[in-house]
Image (cartoon, rainbow, N blue to C red):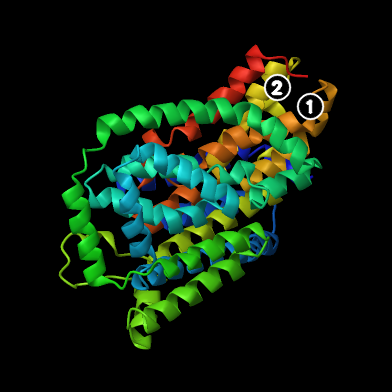
Amino acid sequence: MEGNKAGSVSYLVLTASLVLIIICVLFGIPLYLGFAGAVAFTVYVLIKKGYEIRTLISMMLDGIKGCSRLIMIVLLTGITVAVWLSSGIVPTLIYYGLEYIKHTNYLLACFAASAVVAVVMGTSIGTLSTIGIALLGIGRGFEMPAHIVLGAIVSGAFFADRTSPISGFVNLTLKILDLKYRNYIIGVIKTLVPSAAIAAAAYYFLSKECVPVINPERIAEFQCNISVAFVINPFMLLIPLAIIILSVCGISPIINMSLGAAGGSLISIFLQKSTLPEVIKYIISGYYTSAGIGELNQILKGGGILSMIELLMILTGVFALSSLLEGVNIIQPIIERAMKGVKDKASLIFRTAALSCLITIITCDQALGVIVLGKLLQNKYEALKINNIKLARTIADSGTAIAPLIPWNVNSIMILAVTGIPAAQYAPYALMCYLLPVMTIVFAFFREEA
């Protein structure tokens, strides 16, 4: 009954919600207002269709409660960035990274390093808020186009959400589709390897065109400025190394990030000689310095709980809206209509990819696409004798891959909060996010899908 009620208003609710969100993006209106408007409109329409307000409120509260873990991760991201800056961990990463920069193709190095760390850590945002900040800091220090550098970092970091055995999205996919990781990764590699090879080649040549020639004297000057402002010690690199090792061991991201933040706070106090009130101030307001170290003042700043408040308000709206869309089956009628008349394998995979992207765009989070499409399309794939591995790969290559390209998506909002660079600027250079959907469609039409 609820599905029938929702079916008649699916397009109205989804279109109105998307229009409100896009208006906010285009006119610089805070996104949380767009989501608040979308939630209010959806509730109004559903009440008119006979739903009780108590039922709808209960759905929204359940959705918001369900994102409590993500809220903790967001807060810990702000705290970690601030204390890793104040403790000298990020400056130390930059300091030693400068030793290798003159010998590398920088964009290719950013892409490769981010991909490796992301697969090991199992989190794209965790990668961005640790090694990503350091790589971006090096790039900014040498006047590289920050949005291009971030595009390469994002391209590599989002390997995690589709390949890492400890990624939350990978494990959600395995659970929904009843797959083993070994079988899943063998299927995913078929599109991953050619996409990564094309991206790597593109970053290699793009780096030669866009990254300025770096003067060794400037590197020495930059390192000198860092060593004046911070105590630099290679043992500080044990903190990020420990975070990576703990991730591999399956330690919860919340515990892992808490340990990283605690370690950074202790280093700030005992090695960098910050006072406890100063560290608390950094945790709340973010790190900044007025030590007179030129451009480093602008590069080595950010983080803090306050910088994440707007993001938390947006997340509340995202999960309230998503819980309504899922709770009253608003998306299901659209999927069923889109799949009518599909009789061949290539068309099924193409439409799956298109729907996965559409759900990610509408719901602002790729998890719902994994759940809804994974549950609804298994029988369709079975009828055409396509195994679940290809369904999993199609979802991973499409809706999961494009998430950081969408300005109102949770991922791009978190990237903005961590780096200060909006999706519109870095998206053209996040090449893997485009290559994977294209590659999975190419494979569908030009390879035997059996």
Residue at 34 percent of width and 27 percent of height: 205
Image quadrant containing the N terminus:
top right
Q: Identify residue type, mark 1.
A: Tyr
Residue at 63 percent of width and 19 percent of height: 443
In the picture, residue 134 is in which quadrant? Answer: bottom left
Q: Secondary structure at mark 1?
A: helix
Which of 169/356 is in front? 169
Disc 1 to disc 2: CB gap under 8 Å: yes
Q: Is residue 317 left or right of residue 172?
A: left
In the picture, residue 230 is in which quadrant? Answer: bottom left
Q: Is residue 374 left or right of residue 283?
A: right
Q: Secondary structure at mark 2?
A: helix
Disc 1 target residue:
381
Residue at 35 percent of width and 37 percent of height: 105
Residue 348 tag number:
2
What is the total number of numbered labels drawn onto the structure image? Answer: 2
Residue at 26 percent of width and 37 percent of height: 211
Residue 119 in the image: state x and y as whole percent.
Answer: 58, 47
Q: As drawn, which residue projects farthest toward the bottom?
A: 276
The reply to whether residue 242 is in sight is yes
